[in-house]
Image (spheres, helix red, strand yellow):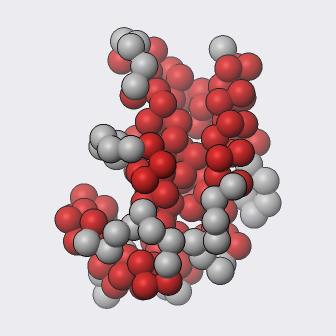
């Protein structure tokens, strides 16, 4: 089971490594957005399995724990990582894998940048419709600016 988890994680990391330009110029925010994309990919993969909910939950926990233990620098601390895992777990991933993963990574990069600037962001559920108008699946500076504007609660 653990070997399968590591193999899937390696494939997802490889997919993320081939993603075009960075979503953030801040190394910490770029690391967080990459982790978010990998977690979204794991969730997307697990949700598509014909497993009972208990098995899906066990596999989700194993994958998240493996990802936390194998992350490189800059590392995300356990508390913020757990928050990110919970946020991804609550996502409703229904459309195409690549677009969902990239869109969610863009949103996490914007959330991180706001936090690093000392600003507060709205919970995703509260601003979901507005976030979609920013077309977060596209990697352009205007997208990140739009996401930050929608997310900013101050």
Would you say 32 lies left or right of 122 here?
right
**Closer to the camera, 18 or 34?**
18
**What residue is drawn where x is 34% and y is 69%?**
135
At horizontal 39% and vertical 44% (from top left) the residue drawn is 96
Q: Is residue 99 left or right of residue 28?
A: left
Q: Is residue 109 left or right of residue 122?
A: right
Instruction: Identify which residue is drawn at 53% across, 53% down.
Output: 36
Task: Give the answer, above or below, for where 97 lies relative to 4.
Answer: below
Position of residue 45 measured from the top left corner of the image (x, y, whole percent): 48, 30
Q: Quadrant where the N terminus lies?
A: top right
Q: Looking at the picture, how far across and down is residue 46, in whole percent? A: 46, 27
Query: Is residue 78 visible from the viewing direction of this image?
Result: no
Vertical side of 80 occupied by 7: above or below: above
In the picture, measured across the screen, residue 135 lies left or right of residue 105, that is left
- Residue 143, picture quadrant: bottom left
Of 14 and 78, nearer the camera is: 14
The image shows residue 4, relative to residue 82, as above or below, that is above
């Amino acid at each position: 089971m653990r070997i399968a988890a590591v193999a899937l994680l390696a494939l997802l990391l490889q997919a993320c490594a081939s993603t075009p330009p960075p979503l953030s110029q801040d190394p910490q925010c770029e690391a967080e957005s990459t982790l978010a994309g990998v977690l979204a990919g794991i969730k997307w993969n697990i949700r598509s399995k014909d497993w009972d909910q208990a098995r899906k939950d066990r596999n989700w926990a194993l994958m998240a724990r493996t990802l936390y233990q194998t992350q490189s620098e800059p590392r995300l601390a356990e508390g913020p990582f757990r928050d990110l895992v919970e946020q991804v777990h609550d996502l409703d991933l229904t459309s195409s894998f690549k677009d969902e993963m990239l869109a969610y990574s863009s949103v996490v990069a914007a959330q991180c940048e706001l936090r690093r600037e000392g600003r507060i962001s709205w919970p995703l559920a509260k601003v979901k419709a507005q976030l979609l108008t920013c077309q977060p699946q596209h990697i352009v500076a205007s997208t990140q600016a739009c996401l930050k504007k929608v997310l900013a609660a101050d």
